[in-house]
Image (spheres, rainbow, N blue to C red):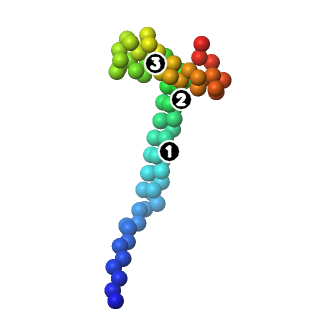
Amino acid sequence: MTTLVAYAPRIPASTRRLRDAVLVVGAVVVALISLYAVFLDQGQLLTPLLGKMSSTGNYLHEFAHDGRHLFSAPCH
């Protein structure tokens, strides 16, 4: 009886290291943008989408307001 087995091609170690490095850099960038949005943003991130209304409404600030106090971060 013949059994067909599919083998996945082996990925070279250098390619795996490069892939891992790209994933780590991407995760760090997303984390830094998230921290900026939660702790420092005063409407600048939403300005391209909402225009002047984003800074006057201060939506990201108000959305993350309680979280800032939970982490003892100053926001006023």
Marks 3, 2: nearer the viewer: 3
Residue 35 shows which numbered tag? 2
Residue holding disc 1:
24
User: Circle 2 — which element?
Assistant: helix
Is disc 1 in contact with disc 2, using a CB cutoff of under 8 Å? no
Mark 3 surroundings within 10 Å by alpha-carbon count, few (fewer than 14), some (14 through 19), many (20 or more): some
Q: Measure the alpha-carbon separation of dots 1 and 2.
A: 16 Å
In front of the other: 57 or 52: 57
Residue 31, x across and y down, in percent: 51, 35
Task: Name which residue type carries label 1.
Answer: Val
Q: Residue at x 38, y 18 (%)?
A: 47
Q: Residue at x 38, y 12 (%)?
A: 53
Task: Name which residue type carries label 2.
Answer: Leu
Is disc 3 in contact with disc 2, using a CB cutoff of under 8 Å? no
Marks 1, 2: nearer the viewer: 2
User: Circle 3 — which element?
Assistant: helix
Q: Residue at x 38, y 68 (%)?
A: 8
Q: Earlier in the sequence, mark 3 or mark 2?
A: 2
Residue 19, x across and y down, in percent: 44, 51
Q: Residue at x 59, y 17 (%)?
A: 75
Is disc 1 in contact with disc 3, using a CB cutoff of under 8 Å? no
Q: Using the image, determine if residue 31 lies above or below residue 51.
A: below
Q: Residue furthest right?
A: 72
Q: Residue furthest bottom?
A: 1
Quadrant position of the C terminus in the picture: top right
Task: Name which residue type carries label 3.
Answer: Tyr
Residue 28 is left or right of residue 48, and the answer is: right
Q: Using the image, determine if residue 17 lies above or below residue 27.
A: below
